[in-house]
Amino acid sequence: MFSTLRPSPADPILALAATFREDPRARKLDLGVGVYRDAAGGTPIPRAVKRAEAMLLERQETKSYLGLLGDVAFSAAMADLVFGGAGPAARIASIQTPGGGGALWILMALAKKAAPEATVWLSTPTWPNHGAIAEFAGLKTRAYRYFDPETRDVDAAAMRDDLKEAGPGDIVLLHGCCHNPTGANLTMEDWGALTEMALAQGFTPMVDIAYQGFGDGLAEDAAGLRHMAARVPEMLVAASCSKNFALYRDRTGAAFALCASEGEAAAARANLMTLMRVSISMPPDHGAATVRMILTDPALRADWEAELGDMRGRMLALRAALAEALRARTNSPRFDFIARHRGMFSLVGATPEQVTRLREEHGIYLIGDSRMNVAGLKEDRIGEVADAFAAVGM
Ligand code: LMR
């Protein structure tokens, strides 16, 4: 049967990570895959995670099944972290998922069951897996304009213009914060306008919040989502603990379906359970138990928030330093957007040829669309990166 298979295209982000690993150059610099790195180049396990894991090891008495919803106390704590009380809890169906990717998949599959003809509207550009997951779930996709390559900010007017065509049964996928790949984010005014459009046109917003706490703060990064959740009848939210808890490989996330009524939420929950059962039966426990312990223990939570604040502060400082170095090298404010952007990524505007030259001549790895992972920069190599940008003619 496998003779019918042709190799499928590799994911551009994970393929680049593999190329980087094989590069023998000592001074190679990975600004590709979205993984936070500290000044030493490592991806540390947060102190609170380590402590919660130690407690878990000591206290856990069984590894028997938890059930299709996973750890419900974890999902409740995550709902609180994400929604902050906006969006009535009784109208939200929650389920623990394997990472944010698992949340996106199960929500798309739920949408396919509820509205088989639904179209998912995706920002141009977006995380490449968004479209791939939607299509795998059997949904149609359409693109809306989002990023202005001139200003390197959000083109809100163009976005609203394109989304005028989104109607009932459609899903508009938004990034909660720290837009991947551009780094350009919606303002509260934009969130307000999109909320009014959802109410008037009847589309269902889906918010992917994979970087909460990496932009301006835990509450700040969820403010737009919360504004929307308090007003719209329906909304889907995919949350990830990969980045803010650094639980990448432990595949920890949650999916939420905000429904128009408690009855609809009960039906959505039952369908999420069925989708979990037929796909992976149950989500993995370890990461979710760890997060649940951190979010419900005031001391652990305070320590986690402090460490997350340090990570955020470091990314902001790296952004400021690189923008400053590029201002000096290019004698222009062209790269000031790097300091304005938020989160791990900025789309820096290199051509594919320049991206190739950065990798081949300077050992600096960006994704092919010129996405740079700011957290991969090192304080003592900012000047070198700015020189390389200038050397390839950016
Ligand atoms: C990224 O965008 O680099 C991360 O979200 C990792 C991934 O799975 O693509």
Image (tube, helix red, strand yellow):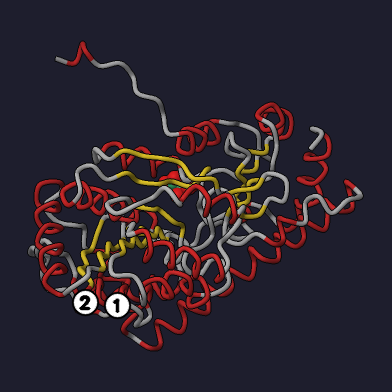
Cβ–Cβ below 8 Å for labels 2 and 1? yes
Report whether 333 appears left or right of 164.
right
Q: Secondary structure at mark 2?
A: helix
Amino acid tagged 1: Ala
Tell me where residue 217 appears, x and y as whole percent: 54, 75
Q: Estimate how packed mark 2 is, as few (under 14), some (14 to 19) or many (20 or more) residues with alpha carbons within 10 Å.
A: some
Of 2 and 80, the residue lying toward us:
80
- Which disc, if any, is residue 73? 2
- Which disc, if any, is residue 129? none
The structure residue drawn at horizontal position 58% and vertical position 72%, both measured from the top left corner, is 216
- Classify residue 363 by image quadrant: top right
The structure residue drawn at horizontal position 42% and vertical position 34%, both measured from the top left corner, is 11
Gap between marks 2 and 1, in whole Å? Answer: 6 Å
Of 314 and 117, the residue lying toward us:
117
Residue 66, compared with residue 387, is above or below; it is below
> In this view, which residue lies farthest toward the bottom?
298
Residue 385, compared with residue 216, is above or below; it is above
Q: Estimate how packed mark 1 is, as few (under 14), some (14 to 19) or many (20 or more) residues with alpha carbons within 10 Å.
A: some
The structure residue drawn at horizontal position 40% and vertical position 46%, both measured from the top left corner, is 121
The structure residue drawn at horizontal position 23% and vertical position 42%, both measured from the top left corner, is 117
> In this view, which residue lies farthest toward the front?
200
Determine whether the beta carbon of the residue marked 1 sits less than 8 angstroms from the nearest atom of ligand 1: no
- Classify residue 154 by image quadrant: bottom right
Report whether 92 appears left or right of 178.
left
**Residue carrying label 1:** 77
- Classify residue 299 by image quadrant: bottom left
Report whether 14 appears left or right of 292.
right
